């Protein structure tokens, strides 16, 4: 079999998809598109989102060559998959046809926004089409293509965290220390993932913005698969509770850690027994060693009130390590900092940073870590990603542009027709969707990435290039932008009114 995990490729979809080709109207072509329907977590103040992860989906799943063995194995599965363990319908004839006539490549064409693009609600991030007898397969791979929701959500979450931290950096950090910003959010999410593949994809999405990561599956994937061997992720030696409690006392544990790693950056969790006592009784010994050796000691609380624990650590470190006052009037602790990685969210991150600055410390004195909150506590509904059919040309040559507008679900209204996406100079280059037939003359941002097989000559951008794209667009684009052209909105209203009339007069149900 050609599929991953011992699966025939025909099963990389939802069951009901296999029944659609037989009932799809005969057509010369069909077109569908993918979009995010809403901003991340319905944030009313910032509509920007990151589109990322399609490269992995296409190279790992969509571009795989199907074989007759895949179809045979799928047929055996479908033979008992219907209710009562009877035969389930699936397009065996079409599958065998493209195995034979298209070298086993799935017969659809995909245009997409580039990896790391900043998009908005209703930006078409993918456009999928199929022709002739394969028109009924246009959305067969919808489910696997929609899995880009996950790395896109992680990438967006990390970028939103970066935005919040950067605001406080601009207020409290000298220009000479701004380089530390990309290490202020660390990925601790490997153990929170359901599988290694998830950690790799989500961890890579995080690394589009930050460099700190303990998720080595992602660090390796990014460096050696996506970036030509050039490293992106970094980490530092650090303890966990099992190391600290293995010693008779926390002081013994910390001193052993400093013996081994004290001349560099090292993090120690200090709440195994009593965080306040550890700060009072152990930290002075640490300070003496760290100042002598020139290293940096990172204090990690892992329980209690998030804000209080960070302030306790900073105040204790200031007392024993000392601090300097930067040009913006904020304290920068010498040879020490604090990292908060216990249950951090975007909201708590802001509360902590505001408290840190209010206490007179620079934002560079505190770092953050996220685990399950970064790589696991997300779902497709956070940005409402969906694929919808938007146009069909029937066998008689008549083209019908289609949109969904459920009377009881206005948030699920879709766009009709075929699209192109263009940079809008009036919005600093933010993407705007147009009808393909009424598009500007400048280049379409939707690029061909799969054409009934791999596209000859197509190469994916390096991870460095994707990072640079995201950083540039997120900085340049407005938080809220007009993502759909007036012409397309007018056309949507026209199609809606026509279809609504058919609903009202009953012809849509005849």
Image: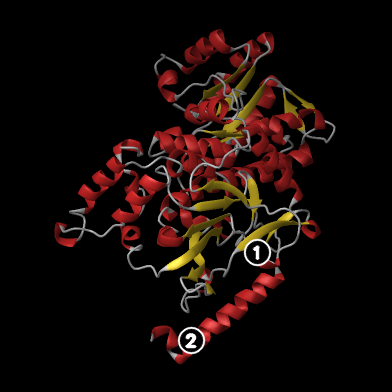
Q: Residues within 10 Å of mark 1 (few under 14, many from 20)?
A: some
Q: Mark 2 points at which residue?
A: 502
Q: Is residue 461 visible?
A: yes
Is 22 on the left or on the right of 313, as rendered?
Answer: left
Q: Residue at x 39, y 84 (%)?
A: 509
Q: Mark 1 points at which residue?
A: 436
Numbered-mark total: 2
Q: Residue 74 carries which label?
A: none
Q: Is mark 2 on a helix, strand or loop?
A: helix
Sequence-first disc among 1 and 2 = 1
Residue 281: where, in percent of width, then height? 55, 20
Q: Nearer the viewer, mark 1 or mark 2?
A: 1
Q: With 8 as the anchor, is 313 left or right in this view?
A: right
Screen quadrant of the C terminus: bottom left
Tags 1 and 2 in contact by the CB under 8 Å rule? no
Left or right, 510 with respect to 433, comes to left
């Amino acid at each position: 079999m050609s599929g991953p995990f011992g699966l025939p490729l025909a099963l990389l979809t939802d069951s009901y998809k296999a029944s659609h080709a037989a009932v799809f109207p005969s057509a010369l072509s069909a077109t569908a598109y993918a979009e995010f329907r809403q901003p991340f977590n319905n944030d009313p103040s910032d509509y920007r989102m990151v589109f990322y992860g399609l490269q992995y989906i296409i190279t790992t799943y969509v571009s795989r060559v199907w074989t007759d063995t895949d179809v045979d194995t799928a047929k055996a599965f479908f033979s008992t998959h219907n209710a009562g363990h009877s035969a389930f319908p699936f397009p065996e004839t079409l599958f065998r046809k493209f195995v034979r006539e298209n070298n086993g490549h799935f017969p659809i064409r995909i245009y997409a926004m580039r990896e790391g693009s900043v998009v908005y609600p209703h930006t078409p991030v993918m456009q999928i089409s199929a022709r002739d007898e394969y028109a009924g397969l246009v959305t067969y791979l919808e489910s696997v293509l929609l899995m880009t929701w996950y790395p896109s959500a992680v990438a967006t979450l990390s970028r939103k965290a970066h935005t919040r931290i950067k605001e406080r950096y601009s207020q409290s950090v000298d220009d000479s220390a701004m380089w530390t910003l990309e290490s202020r959010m660390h990925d601790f999410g490997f153990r929170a993932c359901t599988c290694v593949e998830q950690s790799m994809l989500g961890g890579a999405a995080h690394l589009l913005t930050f460099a700190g990561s303990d998720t080595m599956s992602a660090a390796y994937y990014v460096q050696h698969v996506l970036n030509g061997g050039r490293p992106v992720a970094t980490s530092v030696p650090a303890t966990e509770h099992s190391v600290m409690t293995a010693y008779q006392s926390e002081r013994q544990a910390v001193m052993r850690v400093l013996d081994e790693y004290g001349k560099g950056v090292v993090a120690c969790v200090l709440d195994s027994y009593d965080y306040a006592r550890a700060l009072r009784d152990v930290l002075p010994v640490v300070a003496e060693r760290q100042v002598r050796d020139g290293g940096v000691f990172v204090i990690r609380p892992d329980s209690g009130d998030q804000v209080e624990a960070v302030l306790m650590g900073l105040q204790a470190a200031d007392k024993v390590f000392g601090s300097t006052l930067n040009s913006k009037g904020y304290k920068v602790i010498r040879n020490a900092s604090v990292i908060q990685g216990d249950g951090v969210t975007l909201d708590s991150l802001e509360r902590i940073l505001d408290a840190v600055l209010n206490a007179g410390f620079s934002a560079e004195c505190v770092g953050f870590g996220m685990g399950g909150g970064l790589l696991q506590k997300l779902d497709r509904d956070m940005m409402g990603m969906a694929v919808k059919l938007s146009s069909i040309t029937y066998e008689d040559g008549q083209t019908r542009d289609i949109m969904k507008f459920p009377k009881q679900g206005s948030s699920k209204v879709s766009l009709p027709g075929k699209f192109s996406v263009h940079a809008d100079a009036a919005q600093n280059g933010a993407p705007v969707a147009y009808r393909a037939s009424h598009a500007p003359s400048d280049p379409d941002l939707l690029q061909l990435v799969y054409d009934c097989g791999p596209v000859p000559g197509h190469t994916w951008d390096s991870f460095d290039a994707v990072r640079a794209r995201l950083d540039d667009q997120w900085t340049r684009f407005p938080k809220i932008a007009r993502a759909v052209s007036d012409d397309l909105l007018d056309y949507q209203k026209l199609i809606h009114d026509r279809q609504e009339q058919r609903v009202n007069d009953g012809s849509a149900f005849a």
